[in-house]
Each structure stands twice: as structure tokens, then as C-alpha cells.
Amino acid sequence: MLQVEQLSHSFRNAQGTVPVLQDINLSIDEGKMVALLGSSGSGKSTLLNLMAGLMKPDQGKILIAGQDIVRFSENRLAEFRRSHIGFIFQSYELLSNLTIRENVELPLVFMGISPSKRKAKALGLLEQVGLGEKANLFPSQLSGGQQQRVSIARSLIPEPSVIFADEPTGNLDTETEEEIIAILQRLNREMNTTFVIVTHEAEVAEQMQVVLTLQSGILIEETRL
């Protein structure tokens, strides 16, 4: 499903070049739940953004469904992301002027799907995350945990090959964190969707099937649970 080969990346600032990732190689099978574990500054969010096509690496390959997204043009990459990649943000990134149903529908708007099909699919996914009765509310009327459920539903609506999640429980209390992880695990089982989840919490990582540990930009360990 996802393969990374000899991936390296640096950031440039006034002082010069700062290496962030060094010669990363990894392979993720379809339908797996994978944690990218590491402390702040380890490079895990940079790796996630590179794999999600939100940034271009200095060197290396990133293959999703057999296609090297590093070689894509910006237009081709944007088109590929719409249909193959979902993203769950720590801060939800919902549009405040849209209802939660309209937020979930949004990726399908850009794909040219008809309004009736968008609505039906969004309502179905909201039911799956336990928010079917709140479809016409706005994000400000929901708790943080409920907003993250909306974000999860939105990431699933284009039926992507892989969903990347950047600290999806980072803003939530322990009880709500457990609820969100349980939802992700259930959706993974039911839909066979591949999840790659960045976390700094060992307790979250231990609930995944594969744990990839980063330290100072180097992949130091791979654990299959």
C-alpha cells in the first residue's frame, strides 16, 4: 500500500541547512494501523506530511498504491490526494460556516459528485461515527471529541487508499481519546482502511498493529504488535 525508499529531507533557515529526516525506508501493508512514534522534534510530523503529499522531499521515493507521488506535478498530486489520501488534523480544521454534514461532503464537491450522492454518503458516515442526529449543527455546537469525529468522517468520504492522522487525540482528554481510538480501530476493521497515525504517546502507539519509532530523524525501530 505505502512504501518509502531512501527518503531524506532538510529545512533551510538563516543559519543554514538543518537535516530533519535521514535515509528513511519503510513499507506499510494495506489495512494496517500504523503509529509513527517519537518525541517532539523527531521528524514524525514531517514524515507524515511528506507521505501525504503535502511537502516534497529532498530525495527519495514515496509510493502509494504503486505510484511514486514524488514524481507528480502539482496538479497531478492534488488530483491524486483527493481520491487516494485522507487526512485527520489535531485541530480538526472544520469550516465554521458549514454544517457538519457540509464539512464531511466537502471533498466530494471538489470531485464533482452530485449533491444528492454527497449528502447521502455524508449522512451515512456521520451515522458510523455516532453523529447522525447532529448533521445540521455547526462545528461550534460540538465538543472537541465530536468535532474530531466529523474530521474522521470527512477523511473517509472519498474512500482513500490511506488516511494520515497527525496527533488526532492531542487536544482531547483521556476518555475522549479512548473513544476516538476505538472509532478508528472499528473503521479500520470494517472498511480495511490503512491508517498512519503520528503520536508522542506510547499508550496510543501500543494500540496500533505496527509501531515505527523515530529519533532525531532516523527510523530506529519497527515493532509489529
Image (cartoon, rainbow, N blue to C red):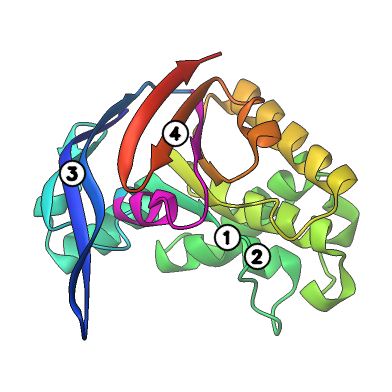
> Residue at label 2?
92
Is 190 drawn above or below residue 110 in the view shown?
above
Q: CA distance from mark 2 to mark 3?
A: 28 Å
Q: CA distance from mark 4 to mark 1?
A: 20 Å
Residue range of the region highlighted in magenta in the rendering: 32-50
Cβ–Cβ under 8 Å for marks 3 and 4:
no
Is 77 drawn above or below residue 13 in the view shown?
above
Mark closest to the chain's N terminus, 2 or 4: 2
**Residue that appears at 84% across and 52% down:** 131
**Residue that appears at 64% across and 50% down:** 152
Question: Where is residue 77 shown, x and y percent of the image?
Answer: 22, 59
> Residue at label 1?
89
Question: Is 158 part of what is drawn in magenta?
Answer: no
Farthest residue, direction top: 225
**Residue that appears at 70% across and 33% down:** 203
* Disc sitting over residue 7 in the figure: 3
Amino acid type shown at disc 1 = Phe
Amino acid type shown at disc 2 = Tyr
Question: Helix, strand or loop at disc 2?
Answer: loop
Question: Helix, strand or loop at disc 4?
Answer: strand
**Residue that appears at 51% across and 56% down:** 40
Specify whether 30 is left or right of 67.
right
Specify whether 58 is left or right of 171.
left
Q: Nearer the viewer, residue 220 or 104?
A: 220
Of circles 3 and 1, the one toward us is 3
